[in-house]
Image (cartoon, rainbow, N blue to C red):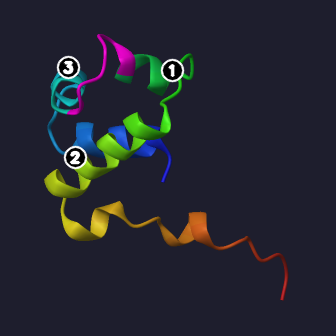
Amino acid sequence: MSPVLVVQRLVRAGLTARAIERQCGFSRSKVSRVIEGTASLSADERQRLEEFAAGFLPKGSMTTPHHERVSPRYGR
């Protein structure tokens, strides 16, 4: 799952961007820059974010939504 979606789900669950950075050990404003698209996460940072989110969010929220897994069907 993309880091932007993971962060958005954490924010919707009630965490602030600063709290996410503290819990995951990111540098200051890293989460904000990832959402804006001006920064990216390394593989280690991405794994830490996903592990934190998996422990914080309900179990089913870390799965990818159906519309992101399946290609669109045009016509019948």
The image quarter in which residue 28 lies: top left
Q: What distance separates the C-alpha of mark 2 from that of mark 1?
A: 21 Å
From the viewer's perspective, is residue 61 above or below residue 12? Answer: below
- Is residue 27 a member of the stretch shown in magenta? yes
Q: In the image, is 55 to the left or to the right of 31?
A: left
Mark 3 vs 2, N-terminal side: 3
| Kind of residue at badge 1 | Glu
Mark 2 = which residue? 52
Span shown in magenta: 24-30
From the viewer's perspective, is residue 63 above or below residue 76? Answer: above
- Give how far across and how far down residue 46 sits, in percent: 41, 40
Q: Nearer the viewer, mark 3 or mark 2?
A: 2
Q: Which of 24 and 5 is in front in this view?
A: 24
Q: In the image, is 60 to the left or to the right of 33?
A: left
Q: Which residue is drawn at 56% across and 23% down?
A: 37
From the viewer's perspective, is residue 44 above or below residue 59? Answer: above
| Kind of residue at badge 3 | Arg
Mark 2 vs 1, N-terminal side: 1
| Kind of residue at badge 2 | Phe
Mark 1 = which residue? 36
Q: Is the magenta stretch mostly helix, strand or loop?
A: loop
Q: Residue at x 19, y 26 (%)?
A: 16
Q: Which residue is drawn at 65% across and 74% down?
A: 70
Which label belongs to residue 18? Answer: 3
Q: What distance separates the C-alpha of mark 1 from that of mark 3?
A: 15 Å
Q: Nearer the viewer, residue 40 or 8?
A: 40
- Give how far across and how far down residue 52 sits, in percent: 22, 46
